[in-house]
Image (cartoon, helix red, strand yellow):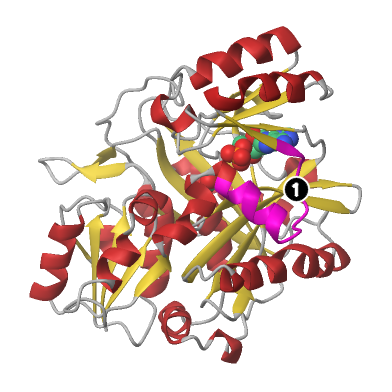
């Protein structure tokens, strides 16, 4: 099969790596890709949100499947763009419809969906300039901290958690006034949930679903969860604090109602659903939905999956995920991100990366890299590389990651030194 993968991060490098192992794959293209995806296919310089250019390429190269990595093309409606075009409709797009992608694209849509289908989540109120007094009253009746969320996509920055009521009032006004542009014309005010976070990844064919290994992401830039939020500085697979009993409870209270809810609402969804949870004791509630896999979670989860990825996607396209069982061994995995000094604030790029050829005990997925004019691999983003190792324990996997990290270098190399340490 000829496959086109959209995206350019570590997630897409991990997807490309896994697809390349499939006997069903004849040719892989990645738009736009990075220096890592180029090892497994041909990068083409089309942005993932330029649908007409993508469609022209798909026809010219007889592409037989499109796999969408990031949220932006999904929220913009790439699934519908193909499904509604007579010459393109037969080509499966792995990813939800535009309406399905609203689970990530609009926090208010996601909260309405959860309320409608009785899926456990924090209490909330959707606020715009039209019901501002209700918003202020809702805030006053909450206990601190106060959670304010821009409704739309805001590059991961649209959630504010504030301790002071006066500040929360001011920020609510600022958000409605355009602090995050159109994304915060509507704001969701939420009850604060305390506990520990983890993420569950589900692949849905619209009727059936299959659950992938779960993961815990380390979002803060600094060790011991200090400093600014990032896209994710590392991850561990199958964190031990999520017991089999908790997973069974979640499947019943969240996963099944989500899939059934999509079906009831007539929302076409053939792709990944990433469900972020907050666990307090044995009670897990949904923090958010994303309409895609996570990054760096893909890099920690996919190496544990033994199934052929392209077969999984074919089953997704054909509505046959009921015939699939996800196979994983007994190992676990850890991913540590190497980032550019300064990230998540300003950072420089273009620094040569050395030592990649010496890595034998880990997988190296490229997040933000490119090849310069001398064909050298250089840094090209905030998050640069994802180093993944598997092992019988988190400690063993993390040890391998950190040994590999010592062999890789670039100017400004930064990483968290504590990924997996909190797991005991
Ligand atoms: P979201 O974009 O909705 O996932 O929010 C980003 C991050 O903010 C989450 O990963 C949580 O760490 C935190 N967060 C969001 N909503 C809540 C909440 N209701 N209570 C506590 N923390 C939250
Ligand atoms: N690592 C968080 C995300 O992919 O959204």
Q: Is residue 272 above or below residue 311?
A: above
Label tally = 1
Q: Name which quarter of the figure residue 31 lies in.
A: bottom left
Query: Residue 213, how many percent across, how many down?
Result: 65, 66
Q: Name which quarter of the figure residue 353 lies in.
A: top left
Q: Residue at x 59, y 15 (%)?
A: 171
Q: Nearer the viewer, residue 10 or 156?
A: 156
Q: Is residue 76 above or below residue 314?
A: above
Query: Residue 194, how many percent across, how many down?
Result: 82, 35
Q: Which residue is mark 1?
A: 121
Report if residue 122 lies within the magenta region: yes
Q: Residue at x 65, y 73 (%)?
A: 260
Q: Is residue 315 above or below residue 10?
A: below
Query: Residue 272, how many percent across, how many down?
Result: 51, 65
Which quadrant of the figure shows ligand 1?
Answer: top right
Query: Residue 108, how many percent across, how many down?
Result: 58, 43
Report if residue 118 lies within the magenta region: yes
Q: Is residue 418 visible?
A: no
The magenta segment is: 109-124
Location of the N terminus by quadrant is: bottom left
Q: Residue furthest front?
A: 130
Q: Is residue 310 visible?
A: yes
Q: Is residue 71 above or below residue 95?
A: above
Q: Residue at x 51, y 42 (%)?
A: 337
Q: Is residue 349 left or right of residue 113?
A: left
Q: Nearer the viewer, residue 252 or 189?
A: 189
SS class, disc 1: loop
Q: Nearer the viewer, residue 87 or 214?
A: 87
Mark 1 packing: few (<14 Cα in 10 Å), some, or many (20+)? many
Q: Residue at x 50, y 68 (%)?
A: 267
Q: Is residue 413 left or right of residue 138?
A: left
């Amino acid at each position: 099969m000829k496959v086109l993968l959209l995206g350019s991060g570590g997630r897409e490098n991990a997807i490309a790596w896994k697809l390349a192992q499939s006997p069903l794959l004849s040719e892989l293209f990645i738009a736009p890709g990075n220096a890592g995806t180029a090892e497994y296919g041909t990068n083409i310089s089309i942005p993932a949100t330029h649908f007409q250019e993508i469609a022209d390429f798909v026809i010219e190269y007889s592409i037989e499947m499109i796999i969408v990595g990031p949220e932006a093309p999904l929220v913009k409606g790439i699934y519908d763009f193909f499904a509604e075009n007579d010459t393109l409709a037969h080509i499966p797009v792995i990813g939800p419809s535009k309406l399905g992608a609203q689970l990530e694209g609009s926090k208010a849509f996601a909260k309405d969906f959860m309320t409608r289908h009785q899926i456990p989540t924090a209490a909330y109120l959707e606020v715009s300039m039209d019901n501002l007094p209700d918003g202020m009253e809702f805030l006053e009746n909450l206990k601190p901290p106060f959670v304010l969320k821009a409704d739309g996509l805001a590059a991961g920055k649209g959630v504010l958690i504030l301790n002071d009521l006066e500040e929360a009032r001011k920020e609510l006004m600022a958000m409605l006034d355009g602090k995050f542009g159109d994304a915060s014309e509507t704001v969701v005010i939420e009850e604060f949930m305390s506990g520990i976070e983890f993420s569950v990844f589900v692949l849905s064919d619209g009727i059936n679903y299959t659950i992938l290994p779960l993961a815990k992401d380390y979002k803060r830039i600094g060790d011991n969860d200090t400093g600014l939020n990032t896209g994710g500085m590392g991850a561990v697979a199958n964190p031990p604090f999520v017991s089999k009993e908790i997973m069974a409870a979640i499947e019943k209270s969240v996963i099944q109602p989500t899939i059934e809810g999509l079906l009831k609402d007539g929302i076409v969804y053939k792709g990944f659903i990433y469900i972020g949870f907050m666990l307090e004791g044995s009670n897990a509630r949904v923090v958010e939905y994303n309409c895609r896999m996570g990054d760096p979670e893909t890099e920690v989860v996919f190496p544990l999956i033994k199934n052929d990825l392209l077969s999984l996607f074919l089953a997704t396209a054909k509505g046959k995920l009921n015939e699939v069982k996800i196979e994983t061994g007994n190992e676990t995995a850890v991913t540590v991100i190497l980032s550019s000094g300064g990230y998540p604030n300003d950072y420089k790029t273009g620094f040569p990366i050395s030592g990649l050829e010496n890595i034998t005990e880990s997988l190296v997925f490229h997040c933000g890299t490119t090849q310069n004019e001398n064909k050298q691999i250089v840094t090209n983003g905030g998050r640069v590389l994802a180093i993944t190792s598997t092992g019988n324990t988190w400690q063993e996997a993390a040890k391998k990651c950190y040994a590999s990290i010592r062999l890789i270098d670039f100017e400004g190399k930064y990483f968290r030194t504590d990924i997996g340490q909190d797991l005991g």
